[in-house]
Image: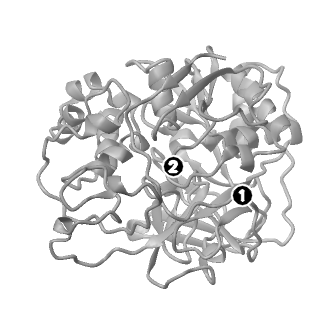
Amino acid sequence: MSKIVKLKKGFDLKLAGKAPLEHINLPAVQTFAIKPTDFPGIQRPKVLVNEGDTVKAGTPILIDKAMDQVIYAAPVSGEIVEIKRGEKRKLLEIKILADQTISYEEFGKIDLNQDRDALAAKLASCGVWPNVIQRPFGVVANPAETPRAIFISGFDSHPLAPDFGFTLAGEENYFQAGIDALAKLTSGKVHLSVDGSKSVPSIYSGIKNAEIHQFSGPHPAGNVGTQIHHIAPINKGELVWTVTPIGVVQIGKAVLEGVYDASKVIVLTGSELTKTGYVKTFVGANVSSFVKGNLNSGHVRVISGNVLTGEKVPMEGYMGFYHNQVTVIPEGDYEEFLGWLKPSSAKLSFHKAIGMLSFLNKGEFKVDTNTHGEERPFVVTGVFEKVMPMDILPTYLFKAIISEDFDEMEELGLYELVEEDVALCEFVDPSKNDLQGLVRNGIELLMYS
């Protein structure tokens, strides 16, 4: 095993509402949805089913006309009950009313001895391929291309994130099969990063066909972008892929079982839930079964994902394709007159400003969604560099994106970033800018220029 990469820059948000390592029982989820908006870079989505159709888990329901060899499949069996569109008929959701017992399309077990292109085509056709993300740009990978390397972050350092050692316990054979398949798809290595501050969980111990790295330090130590930067940074013209541990297991199940099994264990967290814990469900689950009757108060925000990078969803909304966590915190739509002047150790803040005495509080914080200020002109404070553990100058990069300076965007490292890599910068930004949206705008400028 390689040496531990110890990161000093970053920030851990110690929030109330952490889930204990135990499974909880809640009412079964009735409906699931696939949302094209979950897949950055999808250009021309085409629906392959109609309302009223019945499907099995793994039945193709959506393709991108710009890369039609990649299938977006139904995560569960059941009936297509709604194909929801928005303005200008933009496709928003394909909803499925799930069967009580899930049935699966049979693709046949996958032979890992076949040539690389045939293996990639097979995986792309059975529903598991959207788990493979390309960098630069953070979009679903093209199976016809060969990456320089594949990176997997074996732990999540986001606030209240799930423990993969717990959620993936017992999936060791599928994880190894997924690693074996990915090793066939790259011209280089498969890199697996683990939490260097803990013992290696059973899911990763004894793994073959992957090089293991250890990372320790505050968030974003668990971000795969941070790990790529310290293992082998991306240069212009290079291509790497990333996969989450849950995606690796789904690929492994496709290899060994010949099915698209979209089941996974997610974590319910947040200070406004009466019952937190781990629940087994499927990709795209409706969140109402998790939160209704499980709230401390009625004025809350439900987030699919974590508080830094997650998506606000309504009480009847659906989890994002890549999310393994539901977080519920108080809504913060109130005004506080001169709140920043009042000495308080109850407000979580990176800045040790007057009034913000959070550094005196060594416990957990109950945070709401109030940003304690409105968006204002971009101010250079040097604070971004304190939470970015990469050899990148974020302040100058953000300015280059705002001014649409393509050369500067490339030279300052935009190829290495996606939204989650700047989420902490957005949290500490005194100007309250949407920096994750800014980075996505910059990425799209480079992609389509």
Q: Residue 357 at x, y = what percent?
A: 28, 58
Left or right of 157 in this view: 109: right
Residue 253 versus residue 102 in the image, above or below = above
Pointer 2: residues within 10 angstroms few (<14), some, or many (20+)? some
For label 1, the SS is loop
Left or right of 402 in this view: 143: right
Left or right of 285 in this view: 340: left
For label 2, the SS is loop
Q: Give the residue drawn at x 79%, y 36%.
A: 202
| Quadrant of the snapshot with the N terminus | top right
Residue 235 versus residue 363 in the image, above or below = above
| Quadrant of the snapshot with the C terminus | top left
Depth check: 37 or 378 in front? 378
Q: Amino acid at mark 1?
A: Pro
Depth check: 301 or 241 in front? 301
Q: Amino acid at mark 2?
A: Phe
Residue 34 versus residue 96 in the image, above or below = above
Q: Quadrant of residue 25 in the image?
A: bottom right
* Label 2, label 1: how far apart the Cα atoms are: 15 Å
Q: Which residue is mark 1?
A: 75
Q: Residue 361 at x, y = what percent?
A: 39, 58
Residue 283, can we see it? no
Q: Residue 409 at x, y = what percent?
A: 25, 29
Q: Give the residue drawn at x 28%, y 25%.
A: 410
Q: Which residue is mark 2?
A: 39
